[in-house]
Image (cartoon, helix red, strand yellow):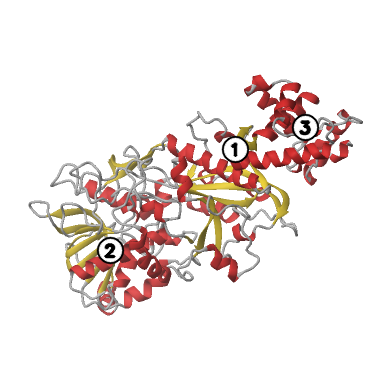
Amino acid sequence: MRPFFFITFLNTIFMHIDARYIENNTLIEGDLCIIGAGAAGISMALEWIDTGRKVILLEGGGFDYETNMQDLYKGRTTGQRYYPLESARLHYFGGTTGHWAGFCSPLDPIDFKKRDWIPLSGWPIQRGDMDPFYARAHKNLDLGPYEYDPQYYEQLDRSLIPLPIDQGVVHNKMWQFSPPTRFGSKYKETIIKAPNIHLYTYANVTDITANEHVSAINEVTVKNFAGKQHTVRAKNFVLACCAIQNARLLLASNKQTTNGLGNDHDMVGRHFMEHIEIKSAEMWLAKPDLLKLYMIDFGKTKYRAELGISEQKQQEYKILNGTASLTPLEIARKEPAFIDIWTANRKEREKNMAAYGKEGVKQPVKGFRNFQLFTRIEQAPNPNSRVTLDTETDALGVRRSMLHWELTPLEKRSIRKIYEIIGQQLGIVSKGRVKLMEYLQDENDNSWPEFTGGGWHHMGTTRMSEDAKQGVVDANCKVHGIENLYAAGSSCYVTAGAPNPTLTVVALTLRLSDHLKKKNGINV
Amino acid sequence: MQRRDFIYVSAYTAAALALPVISGCANQQINAEAQPYFFSHIADVKTIASIGLAYRKTHSAEDDKDKLTELLLANSNLPKSSKDDQIRSMLMNKVENDFKTGKMAVVNGWVLSVTEARQCALFSLLHS
């Protein structure tokens, strides 16, 4: 049997189709087309198994890392120093879950609220709207119960003793750790065996075509390095390619509207947000302490706390929401900044990351006396922080993305204030003192040090708003003005909160899935 | 009060930092007012002196031994004949109260109570 026919035969048994081996200009039709097979796309597809609807799941890459696929993500960066774009996302089935670290925590209620000190804050949904979906997302990510009350964990393990500070000011924000679930390996078989889920690999969407009035999407064009081009038609389309690629695809689909799709108000690509992740301060204790509640042993720890600032204090000091994680100073001082070791070269990057946190410092029996305080904080929505199209095109002819990452003075002021608050609370209980790092010491200095980094968390480029002039998608993640085009994942974030985004990405996707099911007459 | 009662130097900084100070302050009595007691369990003498100097630079009106002593003992209701441990206890309470009321100063990056920043300043004046 010739390979072409053999593969075609396999494709009819398993619902996986390699788009390189089907006839050129194939027309693929379905009820729902999901563009991108990462945490969002796969979570969406899983929800639609056995619904009696034909789902087309399009993945640009295959099942493994390939340099030429990653190259499609390459793009220029300007503004604040950033990681090489082609290294920040993985372009194969499973997406960036192929190298994520498993950090999970829900956004706080305040993250969804309108905060008058943060321009463009306020989601059209609230935390209560998300809770049922967070609980469901836990299953996808192999997490424990949907429980983030620190007292729950303190009761589970009496050795998890919190710092004796006022929880009404500085609270213990809990994180749970996914194994981390690699969506590519965990869900491949389930997806492929699902009769109604048609997974197409090597199916890079390069263009979206709307109807004459640009009020609905008719079809998308897919291409691959085998020189094949196909067309996919569906009743509904979901962009699930991550925040940079979602924006890029909308902007690049500009043959019918000069500014691209969903971009009547020049909002697509704007408000790109990252979590600023940066060494910020030191905590010195009068007596050694284990502080086990706050420690992490990668691959073993299932949950831990970081120090967060209460909603009331955030409001009082008009600061952003962020947390401080603790690492014994002796260890932390040996750890380089992520921004310095996360290089474009995959082998070098993996070597650097494998060595990270393995300095072999022996823990004293009574614990440590000094700890590094490491910040993870939201950045304020900023229209100048944005994804645009570069003039250069990738190997499939799509203009490359260009990222301008820009921070504001509010971020720096917030970090400084967070540590003043923590320092104050430690002072009140005579537990220890906090020392700010040099870059935070001058309150009039708004510059950022070279080691400032992000968490590889891309958010906000198709932000959610009920007002089409303020956002790209509505509260149901539907692109304004286009009746059958949706965005899934972190591109819909209005504000970023402090937590790593994957849990919220999956939860938002499940919420979108329920909406689409209802729209299509499917029980949820 | 003996010098050994004062600065507690953390184990791994002791060797590097304690010797010059001990030799410099040998047989010298240290006023309780100039001893940031809790902070001295955390920071070494060099750090305390350097914080004191920095505080004095940004608070020139307080750059005086008598002024600092007056400010440290203000509202204490302690008789002049008070012993060091009474003064120390009063100042420790004052430090705690500073934090409670937000009376803080960030000096050389350290988030301190104003009282202990002044104690550092006085220390640096007495032992410069």
What mark, if any, has residue A437 been given in the picture?
1
Q: Is residue A142 above or below residue A307?
A: below
Mark toward the viewer: 1 or 3: 3
Picture coordinates of residue A203, whole percent (x, y):
27, 61
> Residue A246 shows which numbered tag?
none
Q: Chain of mark 1?
A: A
Residue ID at (80%, 34%): B32
Of residues A201 and A164, the one nearer the viewer is A164
Judging from the image, mark 3 belongs to the subunit labelled: B
Q: Residue furthest right?
A: B27
Q: Three-letter amino acid code at disc 3?
A: Glu
Contact (Cβ within 8 Å) of mark 2 with mark 3: no
Is residue B101 or residue A318 the one in the foreground? B101
Q: Are marks 1 and 3 in contact (CB under 8 Å)?
A: no
Mark 2 and mark 3: span between their CA atoms?
A: 64 Å
Q: Residue at x 50, y 59 (%)?
A: A101
Q: Amino acid at mark 1?
A: Met
Helix, strand or loop at label 3? It is: helix
Location of residue A478 in the rendering, given as x and y in whole percent from the top left corner: 22, 57
Q: Are marks 2 and 3 on the same chain?
A: no
Please check whether the numbered discs 1 and 2 fall on a single chain.
yes
The N terminus of chain A: image quadrant: bottom left
Residue picked out by circle 3: B33
Q: In the rendered image, which residue does mark 2 sit on? A: A512
Tell me where residue A409 appears, x and y as whole percent.
Answer: 44, 34
**In the rendered view, would you say A438 is above or below A129?**
above
Left or right of A104? Residue B12 is right
